[in-house]
Amino acid sequence: MSDAVDLVSNTVRRRLLRDGAAALGEAEWHLLRVSQLLNAAERGLLARLLGETPIAELIDVADGLDAIGSPNAGQRLRTATEQLAVANDPGHGLVRDTTVASSASLLGEQIAEMRGDIERRLLEFAVRHRERLVAAR
């Protein structure tokens, strides 16, 4: 992750640890969720993220991508999430691991192509909401 994105992410995480989940506003949750997605993609952990994160939380990440101005990335995550939801249905247990792996692989490629734009938009979003972030320090 770029140093600036890492700084934003760490600032929000510190506030979360210090003040608790109730202290974070909607914008801060968007920043945290999107930065976690970028971090998972960078570290090759998208399969783990997709496989272990509840569907509702993945939708929250997609909403965060929309909020920062990256609706294309949000839609890509929603598509992966829809495939996971189907794989979670009874009777599909045997294909779930394959679905997670293929969804993570495709999403990783897509995020890699959009990464610079997502990071730029994340930083612009953080600047627009900097008052809360400055208070987080």
Image (cartoon, rainbow, N blue to C red):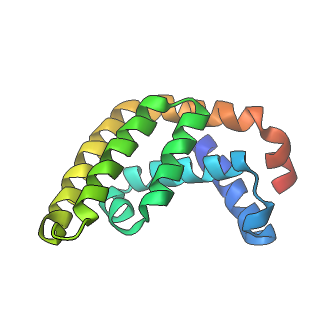
Q: Which residue is at a point 45% across and 55% down the rendered structure image?
A: 58
**Left or right: 102, with 50 as reference point:** left
Residue 2 visible somewhere in the drawing: no
Q: Which residue is at a point 77% across and 38% down the rendered structure image?
A: 129
Residue 46 visible somewhere in the drawing: yes
Q: On the image, which quarter does residue 48 sit in?
A: bottom left
Q: Which residue is at a point 22% across and 70% down the rendered structure image?
A: 90
In the rendered picture of this protein, how many numbered marks are placed on residues? Answer: 0
- Percent x, y of residue 25: 76, 52
Position of 99 relative to 125 (above/below): below
**Left or right: 133, with 108 as reference point:** right
Residue most toward the front?
90
Q: On the image, which quarter does residue 10 sit in?
A: bottom right
**Left or right: 97, with 12 as reference point:** left
- Percent x, y of residue 41: 38, 50
Image quarter (top left, top right, bottom left or bottom right) of the C terminus:
bottom right
Residue 49 or residue 137, whichever sits in front: 49
Q: On the image, which quarter does residue 79 sit in?
A: top left
- Percent x, y of residue 99: 19, 57
Q: Which residue is at a point 72% across and 66% down the rendered structure image?
A: 21
Residue most toward the left?
94
Residue 2 or residue 118, whichever sits in front: 118
